Amino acid sequence: MFPIVEARVLGPNVKEFEIAAPRVARKHQAGQFIILRIYDRGERIPLTIKSADRERGTITIVVQAIGKTTSLLNELGKGDSILDVVGPLGKPSEIEKFGTVVVIGGGVGTAIALPTAAALRDAGNHVIAILGARNKGLVILENDIRAASHETFIMTDDGSYGEKGLVTDKLRELIASRGVDFVLAIGPIPMMRAVAECTRPQSIRTVVSLNSIMVDGTGMCGGCRVMIGNSSKFACVDGPEFDAHEVDFKVLMQRNEMYKESEQKAMADFRLNGGEEVKRVRGACANG
């Protein structure tokens, strides 16, 4: 069992967990993820590690309640436990001195981008962060990102915080006014595709994380197969980060919809019976 040491709400349906997992914490590098299973009847899901504290022996993850398992996880809190945590998995982010780097986080993608932003800063890059959200209430981890970067810009669709507009609006402005050497974008697939098209004309090296389509995280299920250039890759074992200009986003979006019907059915069942499932999980923790 892996105890939840701390838990806090970051925003609507978004929660941060610090979990005791000393072996994972010792080996973690920016860009890597874990596979967790909440209890013996639960599914295994991949979640990117936001940070690791080797001295405390803990890792921190940020979870957005979208489907059944993430909703169940977000019902847990300090003192509860998770049955299985496996990791760190996936290839670490490529960290080197590029020059002027723009790190873009959309929604919970901000948590995934955070450790890489910090590592790029420590490697001697000038790091500019752009956070995007629909409104002020959905902006998360702003202070963490400001600490990990030299400059931070907030973009909201409705203009309720920061500047009104899309992350690509700010990115185009930065490219035109100063020049950019490297871009990392993590968030919804349409946002990452838009960033790729924004940087393609100038051939600015751009990387995106395809963690959202991973299923088992080991390459065995084939559910996260993606087309990178003319090659078929698995997001979990070959990534999760890839050259954005090589990603076939059309195929990616189709594959991302594959399990939508099953996910909707599972979520509907959780809304009806989720209370009993939470009790079962907490019972397992008590007997752990």
Image (spheres, grey):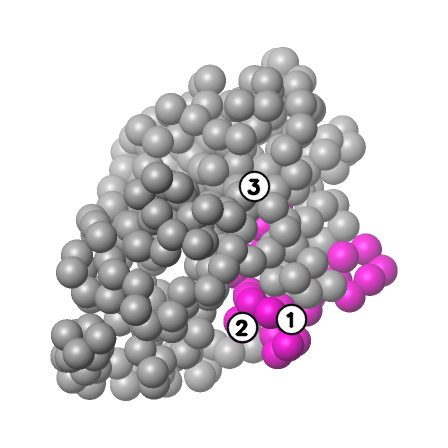
* Residue where numbered disc 2 is placed: 216
Q: Secondary structure at mark 3?
A: strand
| Extreme residue toward the right, this view | 230
Residue 14 seen in this snapshot? no
**Chain part drawn in magenta:** 208-232
User: Residue at position x 44%, y 83% from top?
Assistant: 262
Please give left or right for residue 17 compared with residue 166 in the image: left
Mark 3 against mark 1, which lies toward the viewer? 1
Residue 219 drawn in magenta: yes
Mark 3 is on which residue type? Ala
* Residue where numbered disc 1 is placed: 219
User: Residue at position x 61%, y 78% from top?
Assistant: 221
Q: CA distance from mark 1 to mark 2?
A: 7 Å
Q: In the rendered image, which quarter contains the C terminus?
A: bottom left
Q: CA distance from mark 2 to mark 3?
A: 23 Å
Mark 2 is on which residue type? Asp
Circles 1 and 2: CB atoms closer than 8 Å: yes
Q: Secondary structure at mark 1?
A: loop
Q: Which is more N-terminal, label 1 or label 3?
A: 3
Callout 3 crowding tier (Cα within 10 Å): few <14, some 14–19, many ≥20: many
Q: Position of residue 164 (x, y in %)?
A: 39, 31
Q: Which is more N-terminal, label 3 or label 2?
A: 3
Residue 185 drawn in magenta: no
Please give left or right for residue 258 compared with residue 130 in the image: right
Residue 47 seen in this snapshot? yes
Circles 3 and 1: CB atoms closer than 8 Å: no
Please tell me in which quadrant of the rendered image residue 234 appears. bottom right
Mark 1 is on which residue type? Gly
* Residue where numbered disc 3 is placed: 185
User: Residue at position x 45%, y 54% from top?
Assistant: 24
